Image (tube, rainbow, N blue to C red):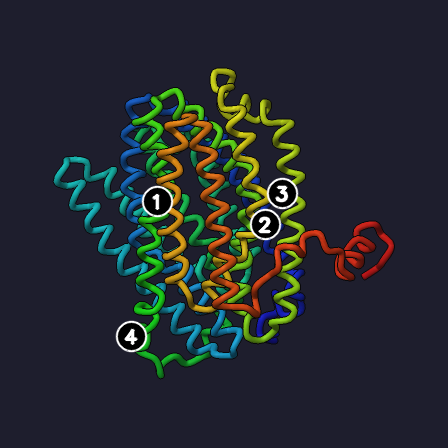
Amino acid sequence: MNGSRPETGSLTIWQRIRQGVAALSLDTVIGLVTGVLGARLVFHYLSVAEYGRLALYISFYTTGTVLLDFGMVDVFTAEIASARGTSKPSWAGFLLSRYSLMVMSTATVLLLVFVGVGAQRGELWVWSIMGAYLWLTAVNLAAAALFYSTTRYRRLAGQSIVRNVSRLLLRATLPWWWTQQRLTGVALTYPLTELAVILASAYLARGAWAEFRSKSATTYSLRDLTPLFARKGIYATLTIPVKRFMAQLPVWLLKTMAGDVALGAYAAAEEAYILLFTFFGSVETTLLPLVSEQAQIQLDRLRVALRQAQKYTFWIGVLATIAGVVGARWLILLIAGEKYIAALPLLRLFLLLLPLNAFTQSQRPILHAVGEQKWILLIQVVSAVIGAILLLIGIHVAQATGAVWAVLIRSCATLVMGYVAIRYLAPDLWIDPRGIVKIEEFDRKLWRVLTGRSRE
């Protein structure tokens, strides 16, 4: 490991995975709590019409965030992590600086566009606030790329926690510091939150940036980025609309073919499932930069770590599925209320996706690590076609229930395609799925540690 990284240099790969999952899971818990409390405050402050206007402004902001880096964040993260793992700190520093320049340049242009739109519509103040929110977000996005690509998961989670807590505090104290139009005041909480995160990021980034500060990147130019965009960037950018299309397709088809009641039940079940899935998603988030960093220097240890992560996530997913099936009614009542009880059987079907996540969580990180973003796009496109056909059939036959079955079958197809692609493109990193039932010495050692029979 690189001795210049005191935060992670003495940790094994498995310890770093555990550290990342723990930090990001804590962030998820805090984000859920502060999100619910913050949403209640916003509903209290704003009327339905005002909330509708705010949602419109936020939708434009959300669109702007996609344009900030054109979906390149994972590509740059994997490339920077790989450069660090192969002892190319100057190339890693160059990539980080150019990614930061890219997002800040785009954010500045979008800020001017937002101000122009606001002036034209006679809403200069609110649109300028949203533009400032986007620009400040870009600053923190650059800092997040630094933390993420250097596998400083606790700092990445700390940045997010500061954001969630600051936003809640600003909303809770809104009547004390803002006495004018409530919609403008609520809108102001967004850029003010990002400003607080910038201060935290500046403090958290001191040690991380020191790794690159003394490394000269003058031997590189923008011309050196051309192959990166040609081989990887274009595919990463094209993946975004495909993923967004697949996320919205069940909604569109259910609305058209089954009506609002079926769509409402499906949406409530999906929302409850996502609430549980966020904890499992932290594993893939942790693995993405780590696999790229370690793929060429500690391949054997990385393979073991991936195998164990798959095994433990699978069995935790099985337990979570069983618990979710038992507690599904309570979860639906908590999320949506008694009137959405029709979503109960749909949620129980959705929960079958949790164990599947154990097999898919390493696929995207591995494909990024070996530079095969085009396969990620290809799998997404084929998956979208399969999903569309299955949704048409499923909704026609069984409405919302058929839609969930379509999602399940499409997920299995995507899983199989990912396994085939990795077996062909990166056989050294391919993990046999049968390993989930195999007890190894690593498992025995971990069990001894957990039961207090070892001091290791």
Tag 1 secondary structure: helix
Provide the residue designation for mark 3.
317
Earlier in the chain: of badge 4 and badge 3, it is 4
Tag 4 secondary structure: helix
* Distance between mark 1 and mark 4 Cα atoms: 30 Å
Q: Which mark is residue 76?
A: none
Identify residue type, mark 3: Gly
Q: Callout 1 environment at 10 Å: few (<14), some (14 to 19), or many (20+)?
A: few
Q: Look at the image and tell me in which quarter the N terminus lies.
A: bottom right
Tag 3 secondary structure: helix
- The image quadrant that residue 371 belongs to is bottom left
* Distance between mark 3 and mark 2 Cα atoms: 7 Å
Q: Callout 3 environment at 10 Å: few (<14), some (14 to 19), or many (20+)?
A: many
Q: Residue at x 48, y 56 (%)?
A: 418
Provide the residue designation for mark 2.
358
Q: Nearer the viewer, residue 360 or 51?
A: 360
The mark closer to the camera, 1 or 4, is: 1
Q: Residue at x 47, y 32 (%)?
A: 271
- Total numbered circles: 4
Q: Which mark is residue 222?
A: 4
Earlier in the chain: of badge 1 and badge 4, it is 4
* Distance between mark 4 and mark 2 Cα atoms: 39 Å
- The image quadrant that residue 324 belongs to is top right
Residue 387 position (above or below residue 329)? below
The mark closer to the camera, 4 or 2, is: 2
